[in-house]
Image (cartoon, rainbow, N blue to C red):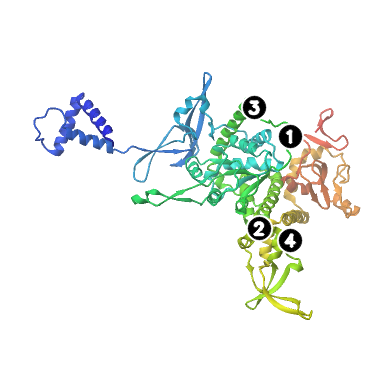
Amino acid sequence: MSLDGYSSGMNWYKNQKNTRKRERRRVNEMLTQKRGPSDKGPDTGLDSEDDIEDDVKNISKQKKPSIVFKTRFTLNGKHYAEIHEIFQMSEKSFGTYQFVVYGNGDRITYTKEVEAYDDDGNQVIIKPAPQIAQQKLDRIFENDSFEFLKFPPGPINYTSEYELYLQIRNFIHKYAQVREEDEALLPLWTMKATLFDILRETSFPLIHIIAPYGKGKSRLLQTMTEITPYGFYLINLSAAPLKRVSQLYSPILYVDEKGQMDNETTALINSKFNRNSVYLNADKEIQRGFSALIGYKLYGPMAMAGRTPFRDDAIESKSFQIDQNFELTREDIPRKIKGEILEEFEREGLEIRGKLLQFRINWCEKINSIQSSKFLQKYESHLEPRLFEIISFFEDIIEIIPELKKDFTKMLEYQIIRNVEVAKDTANGLIASTLLSIIGNAENTIQYEIGGREFAGIYLSSVYEEVGQNYAKQTGKILSALGLKTERPRIKLTRKGKNEEEEEYFKRLSVVRLPDEVKLKELKQRYDPEFVKEELARISQDDQTSLDDEDDEDNEKGDSVNKEEVNRKTLQQKEESSTISHSPHSPLSPNTNSNVTQESEKSYAQNNDWQYFKVKESFSFRKYTYQKGNISKFPVVEAGKFIEKGFLELPCPHGQIWDPTSKECIVIAKGGIESESH
C-alpha cells in the first residue's frame, strides 16, 4: 500500500469513529478485553494512533472475491451461456450481458453473475465476459459499439431441427455462392460447433476454404460468423492472442487469409483439432516458487481461408475441404452488404444465433447419448483412418435430422474425394503421387541386397526428375515422413570396358525401397483420387448386391411382416383401384433389362401383388431400374423395406389413387370420380 493510500485510510477511519461514539467505545472495550487495561492514560473515548493503525492494516488484509469472466460453463449441474440482450430506447440501442441458466429439465432463468468458491474456500464471482477490444464506457459511444464477438440473444424457439438446418443453409445461399455439396455441409458443421464444448469427442474437424483471390472466401467466412453463437472473425492468426482469446471466450474462430504459418502457429492449429491437447507456456512465477508451467486449452471449431493448401498435410487431413475455385455467376447475391441489406443481414443472423442457442439448450444433455447409426461403417476399410474419423463426425447430427440421410451420402463422398485431391497438392502428396506413378515401371525398378536379404526399390533420381530440383533436398525427409525407407546399397551395373566388352562393376546409388501391399494401399487411400473413386464405386456396388440378396431372401421366406405393413398403408388404394391392370409393363413401369425373359417377368407378375409407388431415389431391383421421380408398379410384398429406406413412397394422399391414364391422383367420391392433379 502506498503512503498516500495509507494516510487516506487513517483519516477516513478517524472521521468515521469520531462520529459514532457508541460504536467506538464498544470496539475499545473489545480491544481492552484482548490486550488488558490500557496504561496510556484515562479512556478519552478515542482510539490511540496505534489502535487505528492496526485496524486499518486488518481491513486492508481482508480478501476480496476473485472475478472470473466466462462465456459458457457448467456449475453444480447447471449450464450457463452468455447472451447479449439488446433494448431499444428512443433512437439508441442499449445492451446488457448476462447468463441464461438451463439444465436438469428446469425452466430457463437469467442471472448477471454467479457466486462460487474455490478449493480453499475463497469466494469467486463469475461474470459475463466483456466484448472484445472494448471497455465498459465505450458502449456509450454509438460508433464504438461494434460486435466483434457474435454473442447470441436470448434463446429463440424453432419448429424442428430440419427447419433450423434449412434456415441456416438458406442464409448461406442468400449471401454467398458455394458449391451444392459444401452448402449442405456447412450448416451441419455450424450446428455442431454450437455444442463443441459439451461434446464427448476427441476431435473437432476444421474447415479449410481454398481458392485464389476474388472467389468469395471472405464473404463466406463473414456469413458464417454472423450466424454462429460466439463466432469471431479475424484476419491474422498468431500464437499469443490466440491463446488468450481461446482461454477467455472459447470462440468459434473464422480466420481469413491464414497464409503459411510458423511451427508454433501450426502447433496451435493442431491443438484446435484435438480435445486432449494442451498448449504449455513457461511462467515467470517460477522465480517465486510457483508452478513453472501454464496450460492453455485451445480445442474448438475453426474455419480458415487461404489461397493454397498447408505445407503440412497433417492439417489438411484434419479438415473438411471447401472448394471455392470456380466462376461466380449468381447475380442475386449482394455485391456489397451495406445499408438496408446490412440491417437485414444482421437481423437474420441474430435470429439464427438465438435459435442455435435454443438448439444448444435442447441437446446439451442428450447429444452424447445418441447412438450413431452404422451406415458409415462400410467406408471404414476403404478409407485412410484419419479421413474416416473426419467423415464420421456428423453421425450424431444426422440422427437428429434424419431427413438428411438420403442426401448425406452424396455430400460425404464428394468430401472424401475433395480431401484426397487437396492432400495430393501438398508437398507430401506431390512426392507420394509421383512415387505411385513410377511404381510398376520396370525401367526404374531394381533388385538389390543388404545384409544378405533381397529388396526391390526405385531409383531416387527418377523421383527427382519428376518433382524438379526445388524438391530434391526435401524428398528424403518427405519420404521418411511418409514411412518409406531410403537406402544407398551397392548396385551391380554394367559398362563397356577397354575392348568394348561388357564388364560389371558396383556403385552406391540412392533408392527408395518399394512399399509392401499394406503401405501401398495406405498411400493410395491418402493421395490417389482415382483409387478412392474406385473404392467408393465398389462400396456402392456392394450395397446394391447386398440389397439384391435381401430381396431374394425375402422372396424365399415370403416376407409376411412387410406385406402386412404395406397392406395396412395401401388397403383403401387397393380396394378403389381394382379396375386398374396389374401388369408390370404399363407405360409407367421401370425400364427392364434385356436379359430378363418375358416368361420370368410374367411368372413374377402373376405370383405377386403390384401397386403404384412414387420413386424417391433411383435404384435397381430384380433387373429393373427405377428412375427417381417416376410413378411405377412395384410388388407390394417387397415395398415395405424400400419405403423404410427412403426409395419409395405412396403416390397419392390418403383416400386417392393413381390413375395411369390421366396421370393424376383421383378421388372416388359418392356420385362419381373427381380428379386432382398430383
Q: Amino acid at mark 4?
A: Ser
Q: Which residue is mark 1?
A: 330
Image point 24% across, 37% down: which residue? Answer: 57
**Nearer the viewer's eye, disc 4 or disc 1?**
4
Q: Earlier in the sequence, mark 4 or mark 1?
A: 1
Which quadrant does the C terminus fall into? top right
Q: Amino acid at mark 3?
A: Ile
**Nearer the viewer's eye, disc 4 or disc 2?**
2
Decide if residue 300 is in sight here.
yes
What is the spatial separation of the Cα atoms under label 2 and label 1, in whole angstroms? Answer: 40 Å
**Nearer the viewer's eye, disc 2 or disc 3?**
2
> What mark, if any, has residue 471 been given in the picture?
2
What is the spatial separation of the Cα atoms under label 4 and label 3, in whole angstroms? Answer: 52 Å
Q: Amino acid at mark 2?
A: Tyr
- Judge left or right: residue 660 versus residue 180: right
What is the spatial separation of the Cα atoms under label 2 and label 3, in whole angstroms? Answer: 49 Å
What is the spatial separation of the Cα atoms under label 3 and label 1, in whole angstroms? Answer: 17 Å
Q: Residues within 10 Å of mark 3 (few under 14, many from 20)?
A: few
In percent of width and height, residue 442 lies at: 76, 68
Q: Which residue is mark 4?
A: 437
Q: Amino acid at mark 1?
A: Arg
**Nearer the viewer's eye, disc 2 or disc 1?**
2
In percent of width and height, residue 179 lies at: 71, 41
Decide if residue 401 is in sight here.
no
